[in-house]
Image: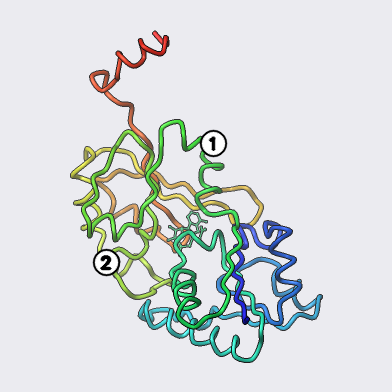
């Protein structure tokens, strides 16, 4: 049976690809990748593994869905020629990579094997940069567009990591100037339903080059427009957890477990 394996490269390039990931890469007939993955092309050249960077299929200003179709079509063409292909994507393949979900669906329809190998995600990198344990206050990790479309209830006492804030209400991939067509007033209005205008928020970009230096830009919901002038495709909006008010504390439970 033909097979596609998807590997998460982690955040800092091939130094974060797992041993399992390398085993798959070394045994694939061709390795394809999307995005910037430090050291990958050098490694593949050195090992004499057939390879191709598919990032050019992700067109700046292109319609998101067209980009996905181009990439899936290219993968299917490769699968036709080779029995066993590998796709490497930045971070974790299960975090925000539509193509991976589409491929999984396609494997059921077309009858090829699909395997997915985890990598260190931007979420992992951000909690490490921030020095927080997500279980202490809890976290909400959400896509900005779905947050607005479904008007999800937000709980300000947990930390929020809002993904894809570079493309609010914009179905185009404007990676060279993401702030231009970003409909951030929708996000601002959504956040104002749950937070005070002066609530602190941060645009966060975990380091991708081993320098260990994340980008953390502070703003408030009030000045979201100004803050978003700095936005890139590598920024997530982080809203730190607020302390719950005393009237929310379950003193009966605390008493029952002997904590007070
Ligand atoms: C298409 S998703 C891919 C995420 C990737 N698969 C991962 O595991 O991190 C892109 C979104 O991930 C987030 N992201 C990507 N790189 C990041 C970084 N270096 N720091 C923080 N967030 C990042 C942003 O929210 C961006 O809109």
Q: Could you tell me which secondary element the residue under label 1 belongs to?
A: loop
Marks 1 & 2, CB-CB < 8 Å contact: no
Q: How is the image coloured?
A: rainbow
Number of the label disc, if any, that sits on residue 131: 1
Real-space Cα separation, disc 1 to disc 2, in angstroms: 31 Å
Give percent across and percent down for residue 243. 33, 27
Residue 223 image offset from top left, x and y in percent:
27, 48
The answer as to whether callout 2 falls within 8 Å of ligand 1 is no
Which image quadrant for residue 252? Answer: top left
Q: Which residue is at a point 49% across and 82% down the rendered structure image?
A: 72
Q: Return the residue nearer the eye: 114 or 229.
A: 114
User: Is label 2 in a helix, a strand or a loop?
Assistant: loop
Query: Which image quarter holds the C terminus?
Result: top left
Where does the image place residue 4, in percent across and percent down from the top left? 60, 76
The residue located at (43%, 47%) in the rendering is 217
Q: How many residues crowd around disc 2 within 10 Å: few (fewer than 14), some, or many (20 or more)?
A: some
In the rendered view, would you say 205 is above or below 37? Answer: above
**Which residue: 59% across, 48% down?**
213
Left or right: 15, with 72 as reference point: right
Q: Residue at x 60, y 86 (%)?
A: 79
- Which residue is labeled 2 in the image? 169
What is the quadrant of residue 177 in the picture? bottom left
The foreground one among 11 and 21 is: 21
Where 50 falls versus 218 (above or below)? below
Task: Bin the neighbour count of mark 1 within 10 Å (Cα to Cα): few under 14, some 14-19, many 20 and up.
Answer: few
In the foreground, 136 or 230:
136
């Amino acid at each position: 049976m033909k097979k596609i394996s998807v590997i998460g490269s982690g955040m800092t390039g091939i130094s974060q690809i797992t041993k399992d990931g390398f085993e798959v890469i070394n045994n694939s007939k061709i390795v394809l990748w999307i995005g910037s993955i430090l050291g990958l092309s050098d490694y593949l050249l050195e090992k004499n593994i057939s390879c191709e960077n598919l990032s050019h299929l992700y067109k700046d200003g292109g319609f998101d869905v067209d980009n996905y179709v181009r990439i899936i079509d290219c993968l299917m063409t490769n699968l036709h020629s080779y029995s066993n292909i590998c796709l490497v994507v930045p971070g974790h393949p299960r975090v925000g990579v539509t193509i991976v979900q589409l491929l999984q669906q396609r494997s059921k329809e077309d009858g090829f094997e699909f395997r997915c190998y985890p990598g260190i995600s931007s979420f992992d990198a951000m909690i490490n940069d921030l020095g927080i344990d997500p279980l202490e206050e809890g976290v909400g990790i959400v896509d900005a567009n779905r947050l607005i479309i479904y008007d999800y209830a937000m709980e300000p006492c947990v930390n929020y990591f809002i993904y894809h804030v570079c493309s609010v209400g914009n179905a185009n991939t404007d990676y060279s100037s993401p702030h231009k067509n970003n409909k951030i007033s929708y996000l601002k209005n959504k956040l104002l339903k749950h937070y005070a205008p002066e609530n602190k928020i941060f645009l966060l970009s975990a380091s991708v080059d081993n320098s260990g230096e994340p980008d953390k830009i502070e703003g408030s919901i009030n000045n979201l427009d100004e803050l978003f002038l700095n936005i890139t495709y590598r920024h997530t909006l982080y809203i730190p957890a607020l302390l719950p008010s005393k009237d929310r504390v379950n003193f009966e439970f605390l008493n029952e477990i002997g904590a007070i």
